[in-house]
Amino acid sequence: MNDENVLLHRDLPLWEDARPFLDVRNNDEHTIVAYGLARMLLAEIPEADESVVLPAILLHDVGWKRIDPDLLLLAVGRNPTRKDLVRDHELFGVEIAQEILERQRPSGVDTEAVLAIIDGHDTTKEARSINDAVVKDADKAWRATPHGMKTICAWYDTDILDTVETLERVSNPFLLTPAGRALATGMCAAVKAEAQIEHYLGRASDA
């Protein structure tokens, strides 16, 4: 990814239309970081189609906007009690994304392929295509990024090492591409190593 700006010019109109639907549960921030991860994964997986993957990652979570905000954290986490809401947000997401794509009509984008990925990006665990795998991995690998860990710790008031442990046990093993697994595993390893700086140096990190 060599561009100064993370979002491709083609995708800026989609982003502007999606933003009003992403202002819940840190989804706006999550989407930008996941988009950056998707671009990195695309560089490692040339057989994937960026004109499908990138619009899909921009629009994949717009459906959370139609879910009661008080119920959002019940749908995710270690012991979710409202898994039905995960499916609901996918269905709402398809409706919203279709409206945005039909309005913007981005050049060279296969709208049906994008919508097919959004419909099932969380509830179908196996990759239905290489494009689906990249979107799923970019979405899930966000949890292992510094931004993702900080966000998750704030949601659940958990320690960062507890979060890493959960990711390694629950999330990272189910990433679908070698590049996605390496990305998430490396970030988790770095966090665990950073936690031991004081042990080996006798002082806290200066960072």
Image (cartoon, rainbow, N blue to C red):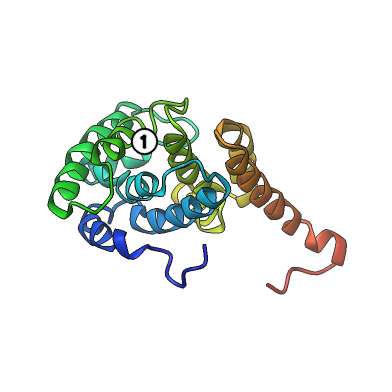
Q: Is residue 16 above or below residue 45?
A: below
Q: In the image, what residue occupies the spot 86% across and 61% down? A: 200
| Quarter containing the C terminus | bottom right
Percent coordinates x, y for residue 5 in the rendering = 42, 70
Q: Nearer the viewer, residue 69 or 42?
A: 42
Residue in the foreground of this view, choosing between 129 and 146? 129
Q: Find residue 27 and report its horizontal and vertical position in percent.
A: 35, 52
Q: Residue flagged by tag 1: what amino acid is it? A: Leu
Q: Does residue 86 appear left or right of residue 91 in this picture?
A: right
Percent from the top left, x then y, of residue 183? Answer: 62, 48
Q: Secondary structure at mark 1?
A: helix
User: Which residue is pictured at 34% across the width and 35% down the height?
Assistant: 117
How many marks do you count on the picture? 1
Q: Is residue 17 left or right of residue 185?
A: left
- Where residue 163 sits, quadrant-wise, is top right
Percent x, y for residue 195? 73, 56
Q: Residue at x 51, y 58 (%)?
A: 147
Crowd around label 1: few <14 · some 14–19 · many ≥20 (10 Å): some
Which residue does the numbered mark 1 point to in the structure image?
A: 74
The residue lying toward the viewer, choosing from 83 and 47, is 47
Residue 74 shown left or right of residue 2 in the figure: left
**In the figure, residue 164 lies in which quadrant?**
top right
Q: Is residue 157 above or below residue 134?
A: below
Q: Is residue 194 left or right of residue 142?
A: right
